[in-house]
Image (tube, grey):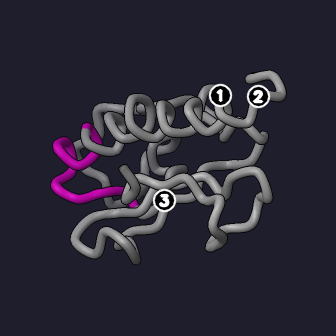
Amino acid sequence: RIGSNPHARVTAAQVDIKNVIKPALDRFKVDNRAFPKGLQDLVQQPVDAKNLHGPYFTSTNLPVDPWGDPYIYEYPGKHNTNSYDLFSAGPDGKPGTDDDIGNWMN
């Protein structure tokens, strides 16, 4: 998706998190008064979602990070305890390391 430029990949992950996935999570919350339990809830209606106006993504357009791995969503978040953490595990593909790219970062 993005060539071999590491900075471009980091920027692409930041854009996906902020401008692609976050708005879908926000729409889900408005529709259902709570954030989803997982990103798959944006693709397939969960049983307890009574007011869903999705799907917000299809299984083929749910973004993966620039390294080809799924984005990681945790609700409630460890960094955003009143909300969710949404992040890429970055180039090493291992969550919880220094190269993670998350919505709690600037």
Q: Is residue 103 left or right of residue 63?
A: left
C-beta proximity under 8 Å, tags 1 and 2? yes
Circle 2 Cα neighbour tier, 10 Å, few/some/many (<14 / 14–19 / ≥20): few
Q: Is residue 88 left or right of residue 85?
A: right
Tell me which segment is drawn in magenta.
Answer: 27-36
Instruction: Give the residue at mark 2.
Output: 5
Residue most extreme to the right: 4
| Sooner in the amino-acid sequence: mark 3 or mark 1 | 1
Tell which tag, 3 or 1, sits nearer the viewer. Answer: 1
- Residue at left 35%, top 73%? 76
The front one of 43 and 106 is 106
| Three-letter amino acid code at the position of disc 1 | Ala
Q: State the CA–CA distance, disc 3 to disc 1.
A: 27 Å
Q: What secondary structure is marked by label 2?
A: loop
Alpha carbon distance from label 1 to label 2 = 5 Å
Residue 81's disc is none
Q: In whole angstroms, how far apart are the C-alphas of marks 3 and 2?
A: 30 Å
